[in-house]
Image (spheres, helix red, strand yellow):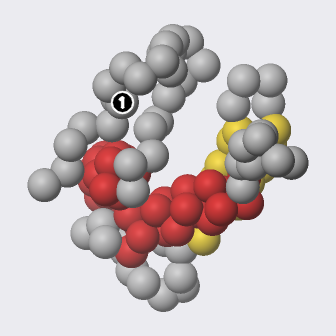
Amino acid sequence: MIGSSVVNFSFARREINQSMALAATTTVHIPSEPEPFVLQTALNDYHISYELTACVEDVNRYRETLSALLGSIEDAFARAKVEILSSMYNAVRDGNRSTVPSWS
């Protein structure tokens, strides 16, 4: 392994899981009990699929809560400097600027 890089994928998975769970716990109308959790559900050709499970306090506000949750996930990933990319996104990794928005 001398002279080669090592990528700790378990660390990246933990960071993604923690960021998603944290996003759920900080979203309005999602209770902390039962505790939200994340499952890795698939290793696809070009991406990994994750599933976040969390309860919603008021099912009549489901769409509002989902919208707030998605925003919280984006914010949590930006704070952790994790890029959210789709399989149709192309990025040249030769020192170009990251797509993660700066978080202040």
Establish if 69 lies above or below 22.
above
- Left or right for 53, reference 72: right
Q: Nearer the viewer, residue 82 or 71?
A: 82
Looking at the image, which residue is at 39% across and 80% down? 31
- Left or right for 31, reference 87: left
Question: Residue 2: where, in percent of width, then height?
Answer: 82, 47
Question: Residue 17: where, in percent of width, then height?
Answer: 58, 62
Looking at the image, which residue is at 46% across and 62% down? 19
- Left or right for 100, reference 102: right
Residue found at the far front of this picture:
2
Q: Which of 81 and 86 is in front in this view?
A: 81
Looking at the image, which residue is at 55% across and 56% down? 16
Q: Which of 51 and 86 is in front in this view?
A: 86
| Residue on which disc 1 sits | 98
Quadrant of the rendered image containing residue 83: top left
- Three-letter code for the amino acid on which mark 1 is drawn: Ser
Q: In this orientation, does residue 58 appear? A: no
Question: Residue 44: where, in percent of width, then height?
Answer: 79, 30
Question: Residue 3: where, in percent of width, then height?
Answer: 77, 41
Task: Identify the element where label 1 is drawn.
Answer: loop
Establish if 85 lies above or below 31.
above
Looking at the image, which residue is at 36% across and 30% down? 98
Q: Which of 36 and 80 is in front in this view?
A: 80
Q: In this orientation, does residue 78 appear? A: yes
Q: In which quarter of the image is the C terminus?
A: bottom left
Establish if 16 lies above or below 56.
above
